[in-house]
Amino acid sequence: MSRLRLIGVARRCADEGEAGRLACGTFTAWVARDEEGSSRDEEGPNLDAVKRHHRLVLGALAEGAFLPAPFGRIYESEAEVRQDLLQRDSRLAPALDRAETHEEWSLRCKPQAAAMQPASTGRAYLLGRQQAKRDIAEALTQANAFRAALTESGGVTDCLALHRDGGELMFSLLVRRDARRHSLDAAEAAAFRLFPGFTTRFSGPWPLYSFSGLKADRDETPEARP
Amino acid sequence: MPEKLDYVDDIDESETLVDLLDRVLDVGVVIVGDLRISVANVELLYLGLKLVLGSVDKIAGLSPARAILPETRGPLA
């Protein structure tokens, strides 16, 4: 018996009979099969498998709009895949529309104080940690203001925030592809204004991992998480 | 025909890999690997990594999709 690993979802296409594709209502699910009892360590939950999942997603994106599944979404049968996706129909359909015109960007904001603090002595290290905690407490209170500023600037359609231990903020930005430059400039300006003393770093574009409608809770509660 | 893609595909660099993990992981997933911390190419620390995302009740409530719970440790790239 084999389990099915969901790679992502595309619109229903004519070649659903191909291996690894499964018709689910108006969608086509891209799946990989894990043979039970297989010794294929590479399919286990390690970093290699995460990278492999990402490469499969990129391969699917080459064929058109695609919603990437989070890593590790496993089903016991084709019926379970269909049932889950059909329950998400109301979220997947608009998400696929967005996938035609949008892309995801990562913006990471890191407090400079922590990065610049030499760790050569315990006291300097602790002072740096205290400063970083103060910085991040202030930054978190402004995370929602940051989201609002981006949305109002046009181009950035949505924004999710994630707080990482150590004082770093990571934002997932849903950006209109045809307004990429404007949107990222606006995001950088907003970060500079709202997070003084933080360094910023963009990476992307990413597949719409954070806005796919396939994640468990975050899609419905896009709030900054302490 | 889809337009030319320029998505991030070089994920071997550590900061980019962190960006990927931030987006690709969901609640209830356990990632196992090894982490090497080094400064100026001098390896300082080698850690076994087991990262659990999500509370137990959420993991248990993930149905019909199952959370992955590893039985063995896997290698790092």
Image: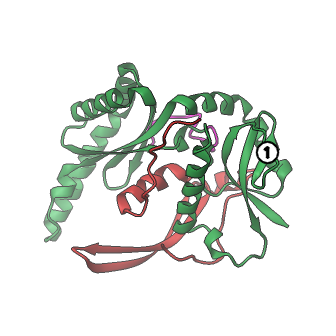
The residue closer to the viewer here, B76 or B72, is B76
Q: Tell me if A118 is positioned left or right of A129 in this view.
A: left
Magenta residues span: A213-226
Q: Is residue B62 above or below residue B73?
A: above
Q: Residue A52 magenta-drawn?
A: no
Q: Which residue is mark 1?
A: A16
Q: Tell me if B5 is positioned left or right of A153 in this view.
A: right
- Total count of labels: 1
In the image, the chain rendered in red is B
The C terminus of chain A - image quarter: top left
Q: Chain of mark 1?
A: A
The three-letter amino acid code for the residue at tag 1 is Glu
Which shade of the palette goes to chain A? green
Most prominent secondary structure in the magenta stretch? loop
The residue closer to the viewer here, A189 or B10, is B10
Q: Is residue A142 above or below residue A75?
A: above
Name the element at disc 1: loop
